[in-house]
Amino acid sequence: MAQARFASLAIGIDEYPQGFYQGDELPLKCASADARRVHAWVSDTFPREQSRHFAFFNAQATHLTIKSSLETLATLQNLDFVLIYLAGHGRRTANGANFCAYDHPQVGQGVDAQFIDDALRRMQAKNVLIFVDCCHAEAVFWGSEFFSRLEGSRCRLFVASCQADQLAYEDDLLKSATDASGSSLLALALFEKIDEAARLRSEHVSLDEALFPYLKRRVPALAFNLKGRAPQEPVSGGLSRDNIYLPIAPSTRPPPGTFTALLARWRSVVTTICVLPRSRS
């Protein structure tokens, strides 16, 4: 495997403080597990001798911690690839949407386009890829200048788990025999594609030709089948000079099959156990 200078940040929040939730929002269960899996994957693929990896979960993932971590990534030199993964609650605002840090109610400000632009304005990496897995995720990037110019980079790309007017779903029934944490629909599809490439002994997966199209097919199908035909359509955006490849290695957990989740859900209905679908709103 080629030695690459790789840096990453994984944020997962599903244990927000008391009083955080509003209206009909339901608590999350899978965001921190998804982020831990992303962190484990990049740490295994790119050991710390060549790379830098940061991960913060739940109460660790404050507004200041996210900001300072992004700023640190932006100042690291000679990086081939930066991957950022944010999983948690999202809320619409007048001009877009916020990804909510753990202390969102106290700070009164979320991770939005301006936040990302300010934190990454000194970014020197050749390739930058950001995943935001929350409700209304597309609107988190509305008005961002960072993704509208390359400034010497090969790519600056983002993946939002859903369109601005949609919810992003997770399901704690999407689990394997060795991991009971469940998964978001986006994270499930992401690791399905990564694991498929790993089984084929590929060293990378094309973003534009393979990963992005797969996410845009698979996630809507999962939402339709598992969430009562609810719409969830991932959005990708940004700029790239050519076809960009995400370097990959075998992940630490096999993806749960859709049949497993459907069978578990059928059994829950038969036994009169009601499982509410949760959205990352």
Image (tube, rainbow, N blue to C red):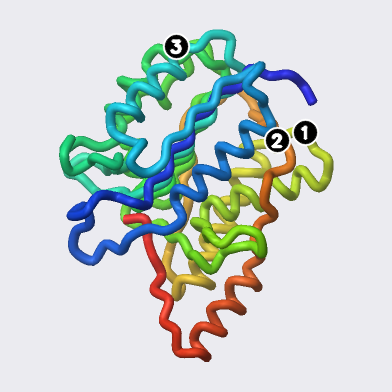
Sequence-earlier tag: 2 or 1: 1
**Residue 160 x/y as whole percent:** 44, 44
Nearer-the-camera pick, 245 or 6: 6
> At numbered mark 3, what does the secondary structure look like: helix, strand or loop?
helix
**Residue 195 x/y as whole percent:** 72, 48
Q: What type is the residue that disc 1 sits on?
A: Glu
Sequence-earlier tag: 3 or 1: 3
**Label 3 vs label 2: CA separation?**
24 Å
Q: Residues within 10 Å of mark 1 (few under 14, many from 20)?
A: some
Q: Residues within 10 Å of mark 2 (few under 14, many from 20)?
A: many
User: Which residue is disc 1 drawn over?
Assistant: 203
* The disc label shown at residue 248, or none: 2
> At numbered mark 2, what does the secondary structure look like: helix, strand or loop?
loop
Label pair 2/1, CB-CB below 8 angstroms: yes
**Label 2 vs label 1: CA separation?**
6 Å
Nearer the viewer's eye, disc 3 or disc 1? 3
Sequence-earlier tag: 3 or 2: 3
**Up/down of 134 relative to 111, above or below:** below
Q: Quadrant of residue 258?
A: bottom right
Q: What type is the residue that disc 3 sits on?
A: Thr
**Residue at 61 percent of width and 79 percent of height:** 263
**Up/down of 111 relative to 183, above or below:** above
User: Which residue is disc 3 drawn over?
Assistant: 75
**Residue 50 x/y as whole percent:** 65, 17
**Label 3 vs label 1: CA separation?**
27 Å
Question: Quadrant where the C terminus lies?
Answer: bottom left
Q: What type is the residue that disc 2 sits on?
A: Ile
Nearer-the-camera pick, 211 or 33: 33
**In the rendered view, does 229 fall on the left or right side of 200?**
left
**In the rendered view, does 119 fall on the left or right side of 180?**
left
